[in-house]
Amino acid sequence: MNPLAPTYWLRAKRALAKSDPVMAGIIRSHPRITLQCRGEPFLTLVRAIVAQQISVKAAQSIWDRVLVVAPEMRPEQILAVTHRRLAACGLSQRKAEYIADLARHFADGRLQVDHWPAMGDEAIIEELVEVRGIGRWTAEMFLIFNLMRPDVLPLDDLGLQRAIRHNYFRGRPVSSRTMRRVAQVWAPWRSVATWYLWRSLDPIPVEY
């Protein structure tokens, strides 16, 4: 198995395949790829802000340009760059402000990164959403892709919504309550189930 994959991955795959025939089929169709840790917390959160409400292709293009002005992606580098220069990378003025605000939170210690491994998912989300530009979706992506939390269910994610409709309801619209009911059988591996449902729409993993 990929050394960057979560230690629980094989156990989660087996449990999901056993409890949900639909999920079993999706897992069988994607046998050699896994979730991988996306590195430093600051980098992960900046990348998630960049990706908000734009296509994967557009996000990658902007990200590549942001890395030119801040190649090590540290808070100090971002704070040394003007909003105008950040916006010139293709970011909206608002996203440039969000990224600068995030950098200030890291630089002055308002985000207690060292405490996060011992904190519950909701406590971390509560802390992250205090930062401008980070809503629940971004915080949930951080929990999945950086902290590797196994049981996150990002119901506001459009890809997850589409995948549930496609795989379980023949494309028919469904409510959040119905999606939550479908997902009950996936616990305590709802992050893994979400990741495989994304793969059912796009076999190439998205990076956050």
Image: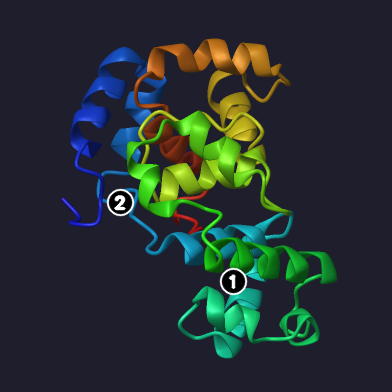
- Which residue corresponds to the image point at 46% horizontal and 51% vertical from the top-left? 112
**Relative image position of residue 197 (x, y in whole percent):** 48, 35
Q: Quadrant of residue 60?
A: bottom right
For residue 6, side relative to residue 53 (left or right) = left
- Which residue corresponds to the image point at 62% horizontal and 67% vertical from the top-left? 104
- Who comes first in sequence, dot 1 or dot 2? 2
Which of labels 1 and 2 is toward the front? Answer: 1
- Which residue corresponds to the image point at 60% horizontal and 28% vertical from the top-left? 166
Tell me the kind of residue under disc 2.
Ile
Secondary structure, mark 2, is: loop
**Relative image position of residue 160 (x, y in whole percent):** 58, 34
Secondary structure, mark 1, is: helix
Q: Is residue 74 above or below residue 148?
A: below
Q: Which residue is mark 1?
A: 60
For residue 200, side relative to residue 139 (left or right) = left
Q: Which residue is mark 2?
A: 33
Disc 2: CA contacts within 10 A as few (<14), some (14-19) or many (>=20) = some
Q: CA distance from mark 1 to mark 2?
A: 20 Å
Query: Front-most of 91 and 170?
Result: 91
**Relative image position of residue 148 (x, y in whole percent):** 35, 44
Answer whether labels 1 and 2 touch (C-beta < 8 Å).
no
Label for residue 131?
none
Can I make out residue 201 in this image? no
Q: Quadrant of residue 24?
A: top left
Disc 1: CA contacts within 10 A as few (<14), some (14-19) or many (>=20) = some
Q: Is residue 69 above or below residue 22?
A: below
Can I make out residue 175 in this image? yes
Q: Is residue 207 above or below residue 139?
A: below
- Which residue corresponds to the image point at 55% horizontal and 19% vertical from the top-left? 168
